[in-house]
Image: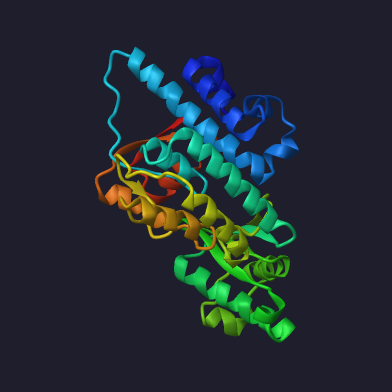
């Protein structure tokens, strides 16, 4: 993760060194050698992923400067969840050290809030409307089992609208168990006649908490304090924000959006549609995974997204 960029680019390697000084740990060594268990802990994964993404940007810029062809001029940017911080950094709204510090704090807060709370699961094959009906059915099931799901704290919420047919839910363990049970069980004739949604597949995600849900409220309050002390500038290019799939120039609004993102669903499907509606024909995704490139392919196949890792 980011190792190739650091080996091939002096600027990328310098970013890893700078980030390591901010968090007090050698992030390049962590990405190269592990331990892998630490990279699955969000407190370390977040600053490491941000650094890997910005290192890919640095390497790409060096390669473009060395090339005879002119570099593409970006017209807008976005990122998924943590990637929103990379986008703000790319757009000049956040300095790199500030972004590293914030993602480290965000990771610590989310790690603490996520301990023992539950998890996340991707539900494949349902529309937005069907997913909302499934969520309501899960909540009704939780209420029926406990008498009052709100009192017992059992929840299941939509966390990410990724692309058509791929929607992620967050919840307590009981909530995710009920989600998987309802989403995949065979419908009885009466339910089938009403068109009760059944998913193609439910995939539990390897995460340390129920992110983008009400279970992250404590983390959101902690992040509010960190954001109050952070310097965020007006972006030099539009940044499509996760919570409302809109662009914002006011730093105060951007801070509010970053805080709300922890407890509200990510509207990635609508965010990608917005870019295409504004004329996007080609894009670049920086960092490991290629998630956005895959989502764009499923959302609007005519748009080409190049992966730079």
Q: Residue furthest left?
A: 279
At 64% from the left and 59% from the top, the residue drawn is 210
At 56% from the left and 27% from the top, the residue drawn is 2
Residue 39 image position (x, y, % from top left)? 68, 38
Looking at the image, residue 291 lies above or below residue 136: above
- Taking 183 as reference, is 247 left or right? left
- Taking 40 as reference, is 300 left or right? left
Q: According to the image, what is the colour scheme of the structure?
A: rainbow
Residue 285 image-quadrant placement = top left
Residue 78 image-quadrant placement = top left
At 63% from the left and 52% from the top, the residue drawn is 109
Looking at the image, residue 238 lies above or below residue 124: above
Task: Count numbered badges in the picture.
Answer: 0
- Along the viewing direction, whichever of 159 and 108 lies nearer the viewer: 108
- Along the viewing direction, whichever of 22 and 36 lies nearer the viewer: 22
At 39% from the left and 36% from the top, the residue drawn is 90
Looking at the image, residue 115 lies above or below residue 40: below
- Taking 89 as reference, is 48 left or right? right
For the N terminus, the image quarter is top right
Residue 145 image position (x, y, % from top left)? 73, 82
Looking at the image, residue 126 lies above or below residue 280: below
Residue 231 image position (x, y, % from top left)? 42, 44
- Along the viewing direction, whichever of 118 and 262 lies nearer the viewer: 262
Asked whether residue 174 is in view, the answer is yes
Residue 154 image position (x, y, % from top left)? 68, 73
Asked whether residue 123 is in view, the answer is no
């Amino acid at each position: 993760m980011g190792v190739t960029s650091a080996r091939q680019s002096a600027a990328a390697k310098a970013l890893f060194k700078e980030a390591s000084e901010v968090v007090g740990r050698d992030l390049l060594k962590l990405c190269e050698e592990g331990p892998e268990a630490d990279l699955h802990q969000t407190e370390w994964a977040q600053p490491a992923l941000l650094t890997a993404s910005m290192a890919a940007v640095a390497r790409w810029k060096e390669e473009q400067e060395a090339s005879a062809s002119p570099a593409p001029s970006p017209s807008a940017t976005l990122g998924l969840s943590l990637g929103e911080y990379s986008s703000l950094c790319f757009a000049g709204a956040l300095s790199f050290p500030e972004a590293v510090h914030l993602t480290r704090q965000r990771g610590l807060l989310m790690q603490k809030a996520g301990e023992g709370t539950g998890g996340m699961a991707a539900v494949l094959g349902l529309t937005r409307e069907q997913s909302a009906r499934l969520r309501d059915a899960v909540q009704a099931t939780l209420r029926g089992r406990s008498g009052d799901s709100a009192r017992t704290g059992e929840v299941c919420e939509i966390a990410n609208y990724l692309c058509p047919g791929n929607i992620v839910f967050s919840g307590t363990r009981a909530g995710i168990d009920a989600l998987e049970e309802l989403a995949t069980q065979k419908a009885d004739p009466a339910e089938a006649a009403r068109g009760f949604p059944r998913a193609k597949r439910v995939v539990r995600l390897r995460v340390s908490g129920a992110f983008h849900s009400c279970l992250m409220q404590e983390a959101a309050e902690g992040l509010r304090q960190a954001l109050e002390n952070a310097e965020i500038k007006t972006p030099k290019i539009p940044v499509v924000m996760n919570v409302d799939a809109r662009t914002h120039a006011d730093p105060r609004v951007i801070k509010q959006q970053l805080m709300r993102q922890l407890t509200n669903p990510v509207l990635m499907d609508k965010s990608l549609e917005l870019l295409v509606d504004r004329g996007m024909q080609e894009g670049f995704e920086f960092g490991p995974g290629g998630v956005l490139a895959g989502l764009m392919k499923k959302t609007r196949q005519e748009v080409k997204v190049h992966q730079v890792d």
